[in-house]
Image: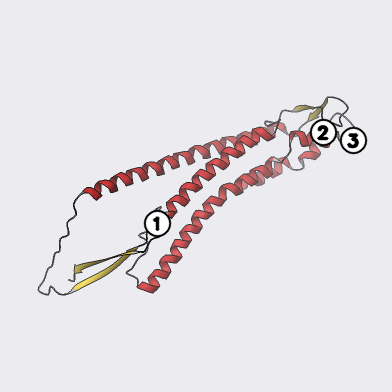
């Protein structure tokens, strides 16, 4: 956002500073529209909006989990929990975060492509030649502050590629961690389970019961309740 505000100062009224060596009415406007159909600042502001929206969805998903956890504890008591950690990437939250990363990488790549596809003078040469109607012939047009605008554009492109690279690395990390978790779970499911009850003291009839409930968010099925009995010391 700070960069977009700074770029606004650099571009300013760009069409006013775009001059052509002809007095033909309409030639100046047509040539400017041909080389710069949309302002760079508006394009980057639109990119910033699209990149920020997925992160807001993740925050809203965590807030939704927190609210469900609060209501569940009010209903069943403080010892009963719906989630182990509302911010932990499990179930639906994992998919929300994973899809948000894919969306952000796609947005950054799309806007870098549009920068080359839309603009014929993507890196701001000092002079461009225009032969659009109603220009009488091939005219020379001059861009204001081309070096400064070129530096801003290169910086934005490099920043977008760095963001794409970091996002892809995080996507790979999530996939590898998810696969390792699935392999570990499958191995544990094949191992026999043993339950050992240890009772200490003279009174063996006194127990403390703790409620722990988890909801399988991804399946949407009924909750499973596990009640553990431990000796009361």
Query: How has the structure been colored for display?
Result: secondary structure
Q: Which residue is mark 1?
A: 219
Q: Which residue is mark 3?
A: 25
User: Within 10 angstroms of label 2, few (less than 14), some, or many (20 or more) residues?
Assistant: some
Residue 203 position (above or below residue 176): below
Disc 2 and disc 3 in contact, CB within 8 angstroms = no
Q: Which residue is mark 2?
A: 19
Is residue 189 rendered to the left or right of residue 151?
A: left
Calculate the distance from the C-alpha at mark 1 to the C-alpha at mark 3: 66 Å
Q: Secondary structure at mark 3?
A: loop
Name the residue rendered at 29%, 68% in the picture. Answer: 211
Percent position (x, y) of residue 37?
A: 74, 38
Q: Quadrant of residue 208?
A: bottom left
Which is nearer the N-term, disc 2 or disc 1?
2
Q: Nearer the viewer, mark 2 or mark 3?
A: 3
Disc 2 and disc 1 in contact, CB within 8 angstroms = no
Q: Quadrant of residue 132?
A: top right
């Amino acid at each position: 956002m700070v960069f977009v505000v700074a770029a606004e100062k650099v571009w300013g009224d760009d069409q006013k500073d775009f001059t052509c060596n002809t007095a033909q009415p309409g030639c100046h406007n047509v040539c400017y529209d041909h080389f710069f159909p949309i302002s760079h600042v508006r394009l980057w502001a639109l990119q910033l909006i699209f990149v920020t929206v997925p992160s807001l969805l993740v925050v809203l998903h965590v807030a939704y989990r927190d609210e469900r956890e609060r209501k569940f504890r009010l209903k069943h008591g403080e010892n009963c929990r719906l989630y182990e950690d509302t911010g932990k990437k499990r179930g639906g939250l994992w998919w929300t975060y994973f899809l948000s990363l894919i969306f952000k990488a796609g947005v950054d790549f799309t806007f870098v492509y549009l920068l080359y596809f839309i603009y014929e003078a993507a890196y701001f040469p000092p002079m461009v030649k225009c032969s659009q109607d109603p220009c009488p012939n091939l005219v020379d047009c001059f861009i204001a502050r081309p070096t400064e605008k070129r530096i801003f554009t290169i910086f934005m492109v490099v920043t977008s590629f760095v963001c794409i690279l970091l996002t892809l690395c995080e996507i790979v990390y999530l996939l590898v961690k998810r696969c390792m978790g699935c392999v570990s779970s499958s191995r544990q499911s094949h191992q026999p389970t043993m339950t050992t009850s240890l009772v200490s003291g003279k009174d063996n009839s006194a127990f403390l019961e703790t409620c722990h409930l988890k909801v399988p968010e991804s399946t949407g099925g009924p909750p499973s309740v596990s009640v553990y009995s431990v000796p009361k010391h």
